[in-house]
Image: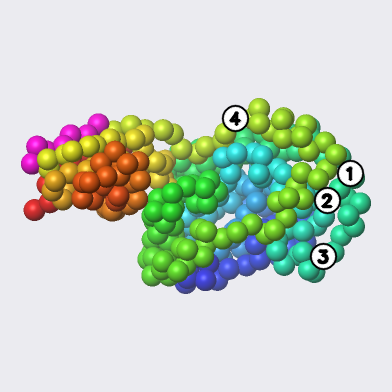
Amino acid sequence: MFNGSSFNSVQHEPFNIDRIFKHVIEQWKENQNIQILYENIECILKEKPLIKHCLEIMPKELNQVLMEVSAKYGYKHLFLYREKAKSRLLSLNYSMKTNVWGKEHLVTRPFSKAVFDEVIPIEKLIDHEINARNEMQWCYEYLSKDNQRPLAVSFEQLYKSDFAYSSILVKQLFVELIGNDDLVTYEFLDKTLKRGSQGTNDDYTRFPNSNEFINNLDSLPDFKLYRQAVVDYTISDDVKAIYHTVWPCLPGICFEQFFVQGVLLSEHGFDIESSQNIGELVRGLDSQRVHKMYPEQRGSKQCRFIYGPILSREDIRIIKCT
């Protein structure tokens, strides 16, 4: 996405202690001068660089100043997060102990297997997760109240969900953030959303107290920057529906937006109307369960659909194609 933007990017996590804007944090820790902090952030953001920021490890004051000053320069904000703590913290613990933060580091940063004899600091990592969630929630709500319309998408939405749904989200993100989805080809989506792990998952649980750690993580609730929604729907008689159901909505990239998902097996083609009429209908998605119910019915293999985005207060009407 950064490559497709007209703005220049800087190092990822640029305020980290070994990165390009480390002086901002160093000066803040040294003098706690809020005016200097504002001046430093103003100097950086007036150039409008693209920034990937780890808000959970930074001072709250920095996060607040970033949000305030960024509004002046027209920044948009995207929150990338994990709903489930287990995968994130197992990975974080492994990376902290081995200094392997990606596939490339498996070659460039060899480490001693003795690290797997070290215990996982369970309480410390769980406290970190809780604090990270609180800070992210606070930042998200701050931007929302300031009418900056933050975007949010979870790892699970992108990599653990139906491919058609994930693809829609990626296209939406590109349009919202860089103005078009020209780079979002099927090949790009296939490579990005179906990518494998970095090959270290099996090592995540090699530590002595891994099982205890996992049991503790399983007790943490999921973290979500969205809410559930259900829409009412009506089907026009001339659609001649044979079987239909609409499931709970899928979250969009904005708090107020959702996608309708369901199956509709009918004698005629169909379209969907909503009060805003801004949604797009993706038809013909795999529906093996319906095909088992109606094996002889034409179209039963591919009668699943996704429609949206819609607003949570909207109802939809399914009509016959004209």
Q: Which residue is mark 1?
A: 118
- When the figure is inspected, residue 150 is found, relative to residue 178, above or below; the finding is above
- When the figure is inspected, residue 174 is found, relative to residue 152, above or below; the finding is below
Q: Secondary structure at mark 4?
A: loop
Q: Which residue is mark 2?
A: 97
Labels 4 and 3: the sequence-earlier one:
3
Labels 4 and 1: the sequence-earlier one:
1
Labels 3 and 1: the sequence-earlier one:
3
Task: Tell me the distance, in whole angstroms, between the alpha carbons under discs 4 and 1.
Answer: 27 Å
Q: Position of residue 222 (x, y in %)?
A: 57, 34
Q: Position of residue 289 (x, y in %)?
A: 35, 41
Task: Tell me the distance, in whole angstroms, between the alpha carbons under discs 4 and 2.
Answer: 26 Å
Task: Tell me the distance, in whole angstroms, between the alpha carbons under discs 2 and 1.
Answer: 9 Å
Task: Tell me the distance, in whole angstroms, between the alpha carbons under discs 2 and 3.
Answer: 12 Å
Q: Nearer the viewer, mark 4 or mark 1?
A: 1
- In magenta stretch: residue 237: yes
Q: Position of residue 142 (x, y in %)?
A: 52, 40
Q: Residues within 10 Å of mark 1 (few under 14, many from 20)?
A: few
Q: Amino acid at mark 2?
A: Lys
Q: Which residue is mark 3?
A: 109
Q: Which residue is mark 4?
A: 221
Q: Quadrant of residue 138?
A: top right
Q: Residue at x 66, y 66 (%)?
A: 11
Task: Tell me the distance, in whole angstroms, between the alpha carbons under discs 3 and 1.
Answer: 19 Å
Q: Amino acid at mark 1?
A: Glu
Most foreground residue, 204 or 289: 289
Chain part drawn in magenta: 232-238
Q: Residues within 10 Å of mark 3 (few under 14, many from 20)?
A: few
